[in-house]
Amino acid sequence: MVEFSARQKDVLTEVVNLGMGRAAASLSRLTGDRILLEVPRVEILPLAQLDDHLGEVADQEVCSVLQVFEGEVAGDAILFLPLPSARNLLELLVGRPMALTRFSELEQAALMEVGNIVINACLGSLANLLKTRFSFLVPHVAVQSLRPMLRGDGRRDDPNRICLLVESRFRVKSRAVDGYLAIVVGVASARALASAVDRLLTATVGSWTP
């Protein structure tokens, strides 16, 4: 697995924070209410450790939006919301009470739009860091248990795949919306990402050793 130094992780955290700030601004426009964003927590870990790292969350049903992206860095971006948070967010979007587990096609489309906003904002920040562009496949939205989903693609046991995990919390009208964004990449993409961080650090602070 590609290892990231503490300095490299700090840079990636700042890049992700910029993306999440843009996502909060876009969601504020979408809901018509000011959305307050707590500072996200960012972790980098092997994909095989993700469900254990999430603890109890991994055993819950979640609403997930999966976006496959391609480019210099390629992988899967998954936004997942515990069902109470998905319901809170939908009630803000549609202006009426929601069922906890059953979402109509229209409600799933609304959640997909939220996923697109958050994922594209964060990947956009990474693209700026890499000075490149990503192309995207059609996103997919689902309500399912998280742990089987994390184990379901057959690639979880690849020790070279890493996950950039973003844990965030939005607050709107006293409603809390907790969410997680997992950006999963293979070894070549992880190396490209680490190299981009090194170039940025060299440009801003001069010669340095990771």
Image: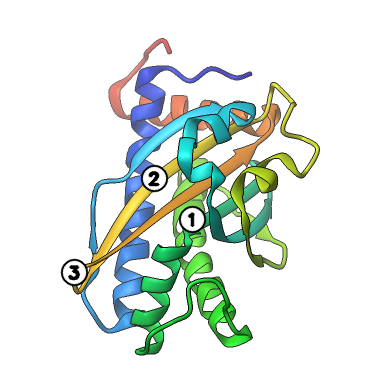
The reply to whether discs 3 and 1 touch (Cβ–Cβ < 8 Å) is no
Q: For mark 1, what is the residue?
A: 124
Q: Which residue is mark 3?
A: 174
70 left or right of 180 in image? right
CA gap between label 2 and label 1 equals 18 Å
Lower sequence index among marks 3 and 2: 2
Few, some or many residues within 10 Å of mark 1 (<14, 14–19, 20+): many
Q: Residue at x 65, y 34 (%)?
A: 189
* Furthest residue in direction top, as rendered: 209
Q: Are marks 3 and 2 in contact (CB under 8 Å)?
A: no
Residue 31, how many percent across, how many down?
32, 81
Q: Quadrant of the N terminus?
A: top right
Residue in the foreground of this view, choosing between 126 and 205: 126
Across and down, in percent, residue 120 comes to 51, 61
Q: Which label sits in the foreground, 2 or 1?
A: 2
Instruction: Give coordinates of residue 18: x percent, y percent.
Output: 33, 51
* Type of amino acid at the residue the image marks with label 3: Ser
Taking the view exactly as shown, the residue that stands out farthest to the right is 154
Q: Residue at x 69, y 32 (%)?
A: 186
Q: Residue 81 vs residue 206: left or right?
A: right
Foreground residue among 142 and 83: 83
Distance in Å between CA atoms under marks 3 and 1: 29 Å
Q: Sequence order check: which comes first, mark 2 or mark 1?
A: 1
Decide which of 175, 165 is in the foreground and name it. 175
Quadrant of image for the C terminus:
top left
- The amino acid type found where label 2 is placed reads Glu
Give SS at disc 1: helix
Indicate which label's residue lies in the foreground, 3 or 1.
3
- Above or below, 192 against 182 in this view is above
Tell whether 208 sits left or right of 127: left
Residue wearing tag 2? 167
